[in-house]
Each structure stands twice: as C-alpha cells, then as structure tokens.
Image (tube, rainbow, N blue to C red):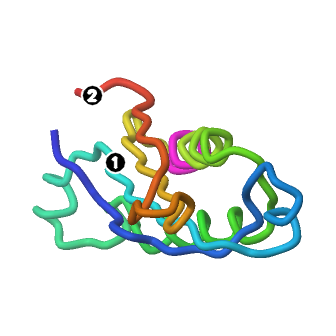
Amino acid sequence: MDIVFIEDLRIETVIGIYDWERKIRQIVALDVEMAFDNRVPAASDDIAKTLDYKAVSKRLIAYVEAAEFGLVETLAENCARIIREEFGVAWVRLKLAKPGAVTGAKSVGVVIERGTRD
C-alpha cells in the first residue's frame, strides 16, 4: 500500500467547549495519511491520475475555516469523512492537534483511522 500524506496543515477555526473559546479563532494542525496506489501516476507521470494533495488540502481548509466545532473528535471525524467520500480514499489516518490547549503540553488531540488498508 502506498500513502499520500499532508503534514502539519494549520488552519484557523472556532473550536472548543468553553464560552471564551467560542469567541475566538484557534489553530488546529492536521497530519493526514491516505492510502493510494501510486504506480499508475508514477508510470504515466500524469498529475490527473494522482490523489491531488493540494485539492485535499484546499477542501479541508475551506471546510475547517467555515465551520465551528465543540470537540476535536467531531472535527476529525468530519475531515476523515470528507476525504473518504469526496476523494475516493479507502483508508485514512488523521491526526488532529490543538496546539497550546493544555499548559505544559505542546499539543493535544486525536488520531483516528477510518476505512480499510489494502
């Protein structure tokens, strides 16, 4: 199995359960791994046959910036669903981090895997 990845995609959004968090925009960081057979695009050198990580990134940025979330779990699930449904990805591993959310920790968040690895 090949993997196409996006690392440390930083996006501003409204996220959090506390009243003060609902009034500000905070940064979330996404690391995404997506199963994709890279042999066909590699053999043809044709970008149209790839999993376009720029298109995935732009879609995630548009979604995350426009919406508001209480939980990082909700945001992670929704991002994974978008990737699988809109880009035809069979398996995705998504790490969603909320930098600076806990004093003394660089970051906190969740890691989820959805779909099947082939």
Where does residue 90 sit, x and y in percent of width and height? 40, 34
Q: Residues within 10 Å of mark 1 (few under 14, many from 20)?
A: many
| In magenta stretch: residue 83 | yes
- What residue would you read off at disc 2? 117
Q: Nearer the viewer, residue 79 or 108?
A: 108
- What residue would you read off at disc 1? 34
Q: Residues in magenta? A: 82-87
- Determine whether 58 is above or below 85 in the image: below
Please state which amino acid type lies under the numbered disc 2: Arg
Left of 106 or right of it: where is 87? right
Q: In which quarter of the view is residue 101 placed?
A: bottom right
Where does residue 10 sit, x and y in percent of width and height? 50, 74
Please state which amino acid type lies under the numbered disc 1: Met
Where does residue 49 sit, x and y in percent of width and height? 32, 61
- Determine whether 65 is above or below 95 in the image: below
Left of 70 or right of it: where is 27? left
Q: In which quarter of the view is residue 53 placed?
A: bottom left
Residue at the image position 53 percent from the left and 43 percent from the top: 80
The quadrant the N terminus occupies is top left
Where does residue 110 sit, x and y in percent of width and height? 47, 42
Q: Secondary structure at mark 1?
A: strand
Residue at the image position 44 percent from the left and 30 percent from the top: 114
Which tag, 1 or 2, sits closer to the chain's start?
Answer: 1
Q: Nearer the viewer, residue 91 or 65?
A: 65
Residue at the extreme front of the image, as rendered: 104
Q: Nearer the viewer, residue 50 or 82?
A: 82
Q: Secondary structure at mark 2?
A: loop
Residue at the image position 42 percent from the left and 47 percent from the top: 94
Left of 5 or right of it: where is 40? left
Q: Residues within 10 Å of mark 2 (few under 14, many from 20)?
A: few
